[in-house]
Image (tube, helix red, strand yellow):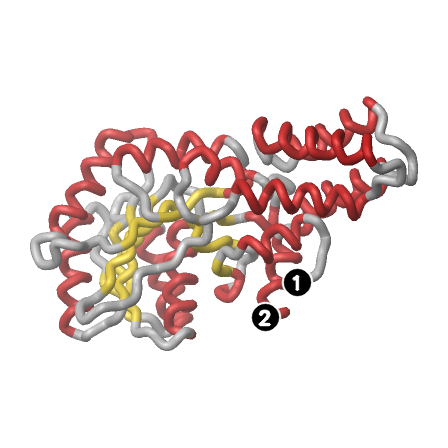
Amino acid sequence: MLKFFKKFKEGLAKTSQNLVASSRGLFGGKRIDAAAIDQLEEALYASDFGLETTEEILDAVKRASAEKRDFGGTDFADIGSGVLREVLAGSEGVLPVAGPSPTVICLIGVNGSGKTTTAAKLAHRLQQEGSSVMLGACDTFRAAANEQLKIWADRLSIDLVASHQGADSAAVAFDAHQAARRRQKDYLILDTAGRLHTKANLMEELAKIKRVLRKTDPAAPHCSLLVVDGSLGANSIEQAAVFHESFGLDGLIVTKLDGTSRGGAIVGIYRELKVPIHYLGLGEQPEDLQPFTIDYYINALFGREAA
């Protein structure tokens, strides 16, 4: 467990440093003045918690500091943690359990979000947990997508179904589903295209994949996960809303959090859409895709140790 928490601490280090530094510098045994509140507000906004959550934390800090003269960084961490726990209640996503036929997980999102890499990392994680997995390379639009996924599949010893660039992505999904059924795989993970600048075409392509899968399994895809780039911060909320409205999301995977100080964006996304968060991408290695847990996330943000 401590090994997993270490991943959270390392991946969210930039956001944590921002928050912890502001709290240490502000609350040295004196009452908080307007300048201190402004500085704290700036740190919260820079972490991308969003307007509502930032105001809730600030209001709670003001009330607490008015009652306690020696208000300090520990008090701020307690207050911030309490607010975030309320906001994030129910946010931990869980994948459907594999059934008698392959459980189909469809990864969607715009190009550049880390979707293809995440597909491979998720397949690796499921294999490590004892499940059999197949990958389907349904991003037939982006030239390097098939090659990138094949490299990962070879590296991690994962079965892959792919075709040539420009092939019908729904046909690839169908072939992958049939192959996963024949080989009695527990999970099939489909990496899809993400050219949002041609939104209507993309949404039709995704809808066609869903229709084709349902010819042989009316419940497929069993889980549709949006992969969003965490470094985009609050901008990822609009992106998530588009896909949720058009395709219907069962959950989120938030990537690239290790390279940003905007780790609070997760809070804003969940607050806005109430879509569960399944995994966080906290680094480049396969094991850096970690299941989202509220405790690890909050403790890592405020520089605390695992409970």
Outermost residue, top side: 34
Q: Residue at x 66, y 54 (%)?
A: 299
Height in image: 25 above or below 169?
above
The image shows residue 247 at horizontal and vertical percentages of 26, 39
The answer to which quarter of the image holds residue 66 is top right
Outermost residue, bottom side: 130
Q: Which mark is residue 88?
A: none
Height in image: 191 above or below 29?
below
Residue where numbered disc 2 is placed: 1
- Say few, some or many: other residues with alpha carbon within 10 Å of mark 2 (under 14 / 14 to 19 / 20 or more): few
Q: Is label 2 in a helix, a strand or a loop? A: loop
- Give the position of the N terminus as an image quadrant: bottom right
- Say few, some or many: other residues with alpha carbon within 10 Å of mark 1 (under 14 / 14 to 19 / 20 or more): some
Q: Is label 1 in a helix, a strand or a loop? A: loop
The image shows residue 171 at horizontal and vertical percentages of 14, 52
The answer to which quarter of the image holds residue 307 is bottom right
> For this rendering, which residue is in front, 304 or 265?
304
Q: In this rendering, would 209 be left or right of 65?
A: left
The image shows residue 295 at horizontal and vertical percentages of 59, 56
Q: In this rendering, would 87 be left or right of 201?
A: right
Please name the amino acid that badge 1 sits on.
Answer: Ala
CA gap, disc 1 and disc 2: 9 Å
Q: In this rendering, would 135 be left or right of 61?
A: left
Q: Residue at x 19, y 62 (%)?
A: 176
> For this rendering, which residue is in front, 98 or 229?
98
Residue where numbered disc 1 is placed: 306
Q: Mark 1 touching mark 2, by CB under 8 A?
A: yes
The image shows residue 237 at horizontal and vertical percentages of 45, 33
Height in image: 87 above or below 218?
above
Please name the amino acid that badge 2 sits on.
Answer: Met
